[in-house]
Amino acid sequence: MAGDERAKNPPAPDPAWRGHEKGSPAYRRLLVALFFAGIATFAQLYSPQAALPEIASELRIGAASAALVVSASTIGLAIGVIPWSVVADRIGRLRSMSIAVVAASVLGLLVPFAPTFEVMLAGRFLEGVMVGGVPSIAIAYLSEEVLRGHAARAAGTYVAGTTIGGLLGRLVAGPLAELTTWRIGVFTVAALCTVAAVVFIRLAPEPQGFVPRAERRPGTDLSLARRLAANLRSPRQLVLYAQAFLLMGGFVALYNYLGFRLAVAPFWLPPALVSLVFIAYLAGTWSSAQAGALASRIGRRPVLLGSIALMIAGVVLTLSSLLVLVLAGLVVATAGFFGAHSTASGWTAAEATVGRAQASSLYNLFYYAGSSFFGWLGGLLFDAAGWSATAGLIGSLALVAAALALFGLRGADPALRRPTARTTPVDTTP
């Protein structure tokens, strides 16, 4: 395929490359391609979440144990992001993402039919490692290919696409799990992801801003350890990584266990209706794009703080015994989370002075480490003390994230820097 050839033989980078202008055909193709990459990865990553009650019932395990089906893949993703960033520095962003999304799709087709729960967890872990090749690279790829003044808006649009993937996986797997089995539901999502992977590979434009390691100027190519250390020594980057760890951990706990609450008193919703609550993800699709556009105008910090406040307000509403307020709270919390995530993830790449790919990979490592740990811990609290305990955990994580952002992200905001041209970066190890 033409996309394969482009990925295998990327053209030499143009030293005067400015990036694709907003509205250009290549800019639109890039965002559409990353939109489908988000579907291909995030739909299969979270599709079992919509069927967790069915998984728990069939396998006769508790809520926290069932959630390991999701946590196993997010642990794999967290472990895979750094190695994938190294691969991307050597063979290119587009080629790496193409390999990752195809491998993840193949595993996604096989894992639902694993003979034992343990084999399934191992398969989900490997699937997560492969999935990690997309989010760990996508923002770096986008940052190199889009004019700098449009990067925040483009990152918001990309994150909006990932929400569609997460929504699609849940909405397909949940109802099919009730009509057939949860295994058929998860397999069907994997099949859709395979189609999305092909669309991504076909549409993604040729990389023009990437400099392979072999072609970088002598003395400018830092070791992996130094690239990682440079980002881990930055106080601002550490605050952004904390946002990923805390907010994503709370968000996954919200979606992992709210379905269990809605299936029992006082709501007694059937499984098919419980799966429909994931339509609330559309609020995240809208807020991601809006947050990126707003951050370009007023700065990332106020958008981040406002988004966290929305997330906290939404979690408080889910404590109500009125279904309409619970669902409204889910919508508000989802909008707040994705507004915060699109803001923080784009800020991470823009803030990096060395190792842009590693900066984004570290963000994703913390993001999915939080998902794995708090996604499981929230279940222990739910099994022990019910939804109020889980909601208390989510709200506390968001409050800590807000305090860190308030005091740790003062100063210059790269979203407000509006150069008319994209100059060659000082750091040649993006």
Image (spheres, grey):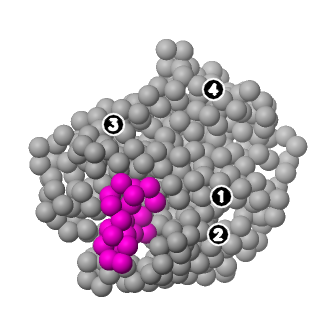
Where 215 falls versus 275 (above or below)?
above
- The magenta-colored residue range is 254-277
Mark closest to the chain's N terminus, 2 or 1? 1
> On the image, numbered disc 2 is attached to which residue?
307
> Is residue 267 a member of the stretch shown in magenta?
yes
Callout 2 crowding tier (Cα within 10 Å): few <14, some 14–19, many ≥20: many
- Kindly identify the residue that appears in the image at 85 percent across and 47 percent down: 419
Label 2 close to label 1 by CB (< 8 Å): yes
Where 329 falls versus 26 (above or below)?
below
Q: Nearer the viewer, mark 2 or mark 4?
A: 2
Give the amino acid type for the residue marked by disc 3 in the picture.
Answer: Thr
Where 124 falls versus 393 (above or below)?
above
Distance CA(mark 4)–CA(mark 1): 26 Å
Mark closest to the chain's N terminus, 2 or 3? 3
Give the amino acid type for the residue marked by disc 1 in the picture.
Answer: Ser
Label 2 close to label 3 by CB (< 8 Å): no
* Predominant secondary structure, magenta span: helix
Residue 302 in sight from this viewpoint: yes
> On the image, numbered disc 3 is attached to which residue?
188
Distance CA(mark 3)–CA(mark 1): 28 Å
Mark closest to the chain's N terminus, 3 or 1? 3
> On the image, numbered disc 1 is attached to which residue?
287
The percent position of residue 230, horizontal first and vertical second, equals 56, 59
Give the amino acid type for the residue marked by disc 2 in the picture.
Answer: Ser
Mark closest to the chain's N terminus, 4 or 3? 3
User: Seen in the image, is 49 located left or right of residue 303?
Assistant: left
Distance CA(mark 2)–CA(mark 4): 32 Å
> Is residue 205 a member of the stretch shown in magenta?
no
Distance CA(mark 2)–CA(mark 1): 9 Å
Label 2 close to label 4 by CB (< 8 Å): no
